[in-house]
Image (tube, helix red, strand yellow):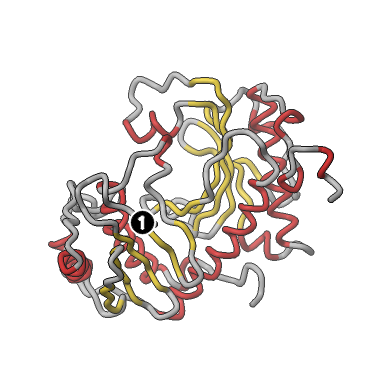
Amino acid sequence: MELFPAFPLDEWKDTKETIHRFEQIVGKVRLAHSSRRNHWWHVPFHLTGSGITSRPMGLVDGNPVFTVDFDFVRHQLVASNLDGHTVSFPLQGHSVSSFYLRFQSALDSLGVDGSIPNAQPFDLPDSDRPFVDDKEQRAYAPEKATKYWQVLSQVNLVLEEFAAGYSGKTSPVHHFWHTFDIAVTRFSPRRVQPPENAGGVECEAYSREVTSFGFWFGDDTVPEPCFYAYAVPEPKGLADRPLHPAAAEWVPSGSGHLALLRYAEAREQPDPKAAVLEFMQSAYRAGAQGLGWDIADKACPGGVTDPRLADR
């Protein structure tokens, strides 16, 4: 299929809002029933050949080992345990409440206690309404859900290619259910003193200097899909540093700036993938140089750190 097919937010916003809440329900189970990893790496979803997965969890919490997958080709939620037992049900035709209750029932049948604290949306307009009370019928257009997974899969591999060029500490490429973006983050070993008003999520995510890169499908603030990048802490003069291609720009975000390359503009480039990689590399250089990182020391073109293997 076409690389980076057109996918404006208004084309599937209702379905996106549904999937986002479904993913938050499963994501909160992942958060509650998996071993904690630094910088919240245990929390996000990963891509599969037909959707996204929670990856195996349980064991440490007294549950059997279990996995939850969203299948956006067959449009099913699939839960399974290590004994080979599987329960699935359709994603279409649910309210948030009925999805939540059906999901809990599926976990019960696998012998899993899927209880979660704060069973309500995180950082969404209806965050004060428990999932079980959201009984409005929700839109779910299968063709839009499939396209979401297809675009996500393409972006995933571009981020993997970009991630290969850095030999320092780097996160996996992963899909965050709370912000509905896919991202990869590069770290330096230098500690960061978080602002006094920072919450626990922010303190753990940004306990070291980082440059981060990703893609999201759009929201009320930026109502279109975009590739983005930023640095924490933001170095002085970051927004004055050059970005490439010419369509990329620095935009204000909170008390700092985001580097943005709009998806629609990336699609118009002669080589869209090369344009996205160029954008992320230029944003990385801007952030890393401003933070004083040794860019040459951490470079590993093509994922190779041993120069003897560079031409093999």
Could you tell me residue 60's position as x and y percent? 26, 44
Q: Quadrant of residue 26?
A: bottom left
What percent of the width, then of the height, locates residue 103? 22, 67
Q: Residue at x 52, y 32 (%)?
A: 256
Q: Please tell me whether mark 1 sits on a helix, a strand or a loop.
A: loop
Q: 279 above or below 232?
A: below
Using the image, determine if residue 244 lies above or below residue 6: above
Which amino acid is tagged 1? Answer: Pro
Residue toward you, 175 or 12: 175
Residue lying farthest to the front in this orientation? 83
Please name the residue shown 27% across and 72% down the image. Answer: 85
From this view, report whether residue 99 is shown above or below residue 219: below
- Near-viewer residue (301 or 272): 301
Residue nearer the viewer, 6 or 103: 103
Image mark count: 1
Residue that sits furthest to the right in the current view: 311
Residue positioned 26% across, 49% down in the render: 59
Residue holding disc 1: 56
Q: Quadrant of residue 133?
A: bottom left
Mark 1 packing: few (<14 Cα in 10 Å), some, or many (20+)?
some
Q: Is residue 238 left or right of residue 179?
A: right
Q: In this rendered view, identify the residue nearer to me: 111 or 254.
A: 111
